[in-house]
Amino acid sequence: MSRKKTSAINKNLFANNISILAKHYGGKKAFSVEIGIAYDTIRRWCLGEFLPESNQLLIIHEITDISIDWLLMGASPYVVHRVTDDMPPYNEPTEQRCKFCGDMSDEVKDLCRKVKNIMESGHPSAVPALLSNITAFEDSVKQAERIRKLEEKMRHYDKLLDPPRAAGTGRAAGIGTRKKKT
């Protein structure tokens, strides 16, 4: 299975999920050491070039306790949260208090439930679309912050280049005006 090109949906979804998982383990290199699979293989999975073989999926599942369904299809997104031993396993009920939005407002909790439902649906176009939209939104927020900081710097430099004039100088004070001939 590893030498076959993947479909666009599986390629993007699996590449995103394995990248998330590798990031939680400290990066692709650390993840490859942890699961005993070559770094280049992990790198190519993260690029979406290939899917792993079934035995590699089982190794990932056994070592990380991450659902194979989530890796391949995006089902059971709660497993993304399951990276440490203090988190419940992916096969426990997901109605429990979410570790990430437990103390947040009802509006945030409702949004978390909606995202969870979409991710659990495993819909072949809705899940990648949601992930893509979230990434685009994060990028636009970062871009807006960069623009705000640049505008702030520009205002600062404008003040340095054009300082306010002291009172009593310039034409209004009679400096620079011609004397009338008498």
Image (spheres, rainbow, N blue to C red):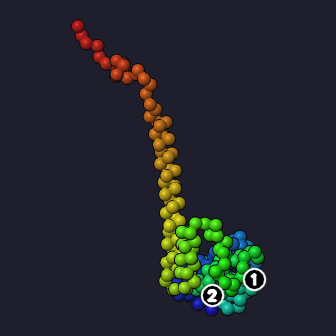
Tag of residue 69:
2
Number of numbered discs: 2
Which circle's residue, 2 or 1, is located before the other in the chain?
1
Query: Which residue sits at x=71%, y=89%?
Result: 58
Residue matched to label 1: 63
Which of the two residues, 137 or 115, is positioned nearer the viewer here? 115
Query: Which residue sits at x=61%, y=66%?
Result: 104
Which of the two residues, 115 or 10, is positioned nearer the viewer here? 115
The answer to whether residue 23 is seen in the rendering is no
Amino acid bearing label 2: Asp
- x then y, percent, for residue 125: 49, 83
The answer to whether residue 69 is seen in the rendering is yes
Query: Which residue sits at x=71%, y=82%?
Result: 89
| Residue 90 found in image quarter | bottom right
- x then y, percent, for residue 153: 51, 45
Relative placement, left or right, of 128 versus 44 is: left
Quadrant (top left/top right/bottom left/bottom right) for the N terminus? bottom right
| Residue 87 found in image quarter | bottom right
Amino acid bearing label 1: Ile
